[in-house]
Amino acid sequence: MNSPLPSQIALPLAARGPAGAQRIVIGNANAQVADALQAPEQWPFRVAVLTGPPRSGKSLLARWAQGLATEAQLDVIDNAETQDETDLFHRWNAVQQGGERANASGGAALLLVANVDEGQGGWRIALPDLASRIGGSLHLNISAPDDAFAADLIHALAEQRGLTLPEGAAEYLVPRTIRSFAAIEALVATIDRISLERQAPATMSVWRAALDALHGPEQQRLF
């Protein structure tokens, strides 16, 4: 059984910002995904497909999982939906051939990261042989963040930028912004930009200006 995951996991080999290594927030949207990524030897056919909405951290999670795979090598193909389907078909088969010679530690595994959202129809594959094999693989999808996840994500993105948010920021911002990874990332970036432009701390007047810039004052009340 995998160890319980903390609320954030670090990427020590990632590009470092003002606050240090990048971190992945763990919560309702991706906890099951992160848990499954720790055990590639348990994946059906040793292949998993990771999907999710834009800016949801799919590639970061894949890099983290690859760093964990010490005994069992993990091969990651990012932007899999843009790759040649015949090549992907051969890569899938190669993992199976490697698995036949694998030892008890698990052998090679393959993680396909596709920039598609299962809620929007998922990955449409034209090659029938590949479609059938991907269909039998493990499917992992990152879902939309809930309130708690959105709050943690706001603070993590601000920390990554070296942006100080006072107490109560997330409680104010979460109900007033669109609940998506891309929207939350854009909100924190806008708060940071306005704070720098005004040469002022990121307090409520800056939060309101950022929300107005992204959503408009009337639209905020609809979220």
Image: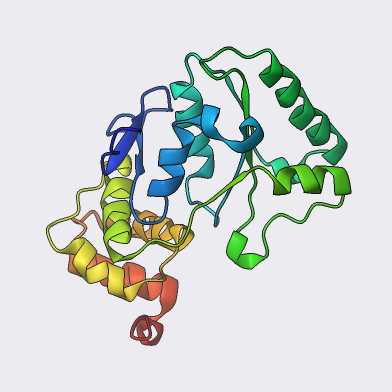
Image position, residue 207 (x, y; %):
26, 67
Residue 125 versus residue 83 in the image, above or below: below
Given residues 93 and 80, the one toward you in this image is 93
Residue 48 versus residue 28 in the image, above or below: above
Q: Residue at x 44, y 31 (%)?
A: 38
Image position, residue 64 (x, y; %):
45, 30
- Residue 192 as seen in the image, left or right of residue 97: left
Q: Residue at x 34, y 67 (%)?
A: 210
Q: Is residue 196 visible?
A: no
Q: Quadrant of the N terminus?
A: top left
Given residues 18 and 115, the one toward you in this image is 115
**What count of labels does the image hold?**
0
- Residue 8 as seen in the image, left or right of residue 135: left
- Residue 97 as seen in the image, left or right of residue 218: right
Image position, residue 117 (x, y; %):
60, 59
Give residue 159's quadrant in the image: top left
Residue 97 versus residue 151 in the image, above or below: above
Q: Residue at x 73, y 25 (%)?
A: 96
Q: Is residue 170 visible?
A: yes
Give residue 79's quadrant in the image: top right
Given residues 189 and 47, the one toward you in this image is 47
Q: How is the image coloured?
A: rainbow
Given residues 212 and 111, the one toward you in this image is 111
Image position, residue 217 (x, y; %):
35, 83
The single residue placed furthest to the left in the displayed view is: 167
Q: Quadrant of the C terminus?
A: bottom left
Residue 213 versus residue 49 in the image, above or below: below
Q: Residue at x 53, y 39 (%)?
A: 59
